[in-house]
Image (spheres, helix red, strand yellow):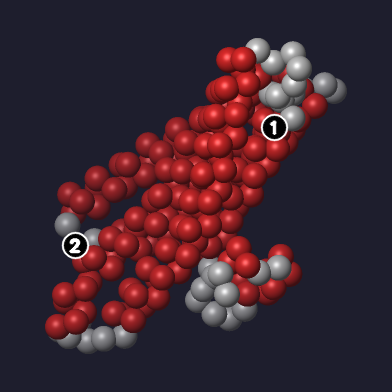
Amino acid sequence: MALQDQTVESLLEAVAARTPTPGGGAVASLVGSLGAALGRMALAYSINRRSTDEQRRDLQGAIDHLTAIGRQMLDLAEQDAQAYAALDALFRLAEDDPKRIEKWEPSVQAAIQAPMAVVQASCGMAGLLADLAESCNPRLLSDLAIAAALADAAARSGAWNVRVNLPLVSSAPERRRIEARLERALHSTSASAHRAEMVARRRAPL
């Protein structure tokens, strides 16, 4: 059953079960999708009668973007599980097996691409939330800050699935390129989440 079709309770039991999937990749994606949903709610409450046309367009555009990110995160959870299953099947073959040799590099790339996409989507989400923190309804700033924190958590979580597969990349320059890209995205996500939280602390009613 697809992750999005499960109840919360059944999903938690599936994650806790002694099975390889759903695992960390799915959890990272789900955390990101929760952050996107919470961000949408905070921004939806920020559109009111006093909003200018430009503010309405910006906020609605951000809500639409977060909707797309949330859907992407759920898709990436499935992609990550499929990539893990394919790579795990190759590990069970002898190193000189023709099938393993043929499919190894593409399977390793797929196992890295899904969690890397989670990191990048989380980075975009955190930046979007930080940029709109000044426009957020003050009473919803705590929700926006939590959404930004979840984006950061999703990025940091997804990064672990990138790192664990990096040693499988045969090209050293390619490994360094992926690692540098990962660290840039993590730094940007963390900075954006921090910026969103600082605005929330300053503007939120106490």
Q: CA distance from mark 2 to mark 1?
A: 47 Å
Q: Which residue is mark 1?
A: 44
Disc 2 vs disc 1: Cβ atoms closer than 8 Å?
no
SS for callout 2: loop
Residue 164 - label = none
Residue 169, horizontal then vertical, whole percent? 24, 61
Q: Can residue 171 be spotted in the picture?
A: yes
Quadrant that contains the C terminus: top right
Task: Count neighbours of disc 1 (C-alpha within 10 A) and say few if under 14, some if 14 to 19, many if 20 or more.
Answer: some
Labels 2 and 1: the sequence-earlier one? 1
Residue located at (37% from left, 44% from top): 182
Query: Callout 1, which amino acid?
Result: Ala
Task: Count neighbours of disc 2 (C-alpha within 10 A) and say few if under 14, some if 14 to 19, many if 20 or more.
Answer: few
Q: Which residue is mark 2?
A: 170
Q: Is residue 176 left or right of residue 42?
A: left
Q: Is residue 107 left or right of residue 156?
A: left
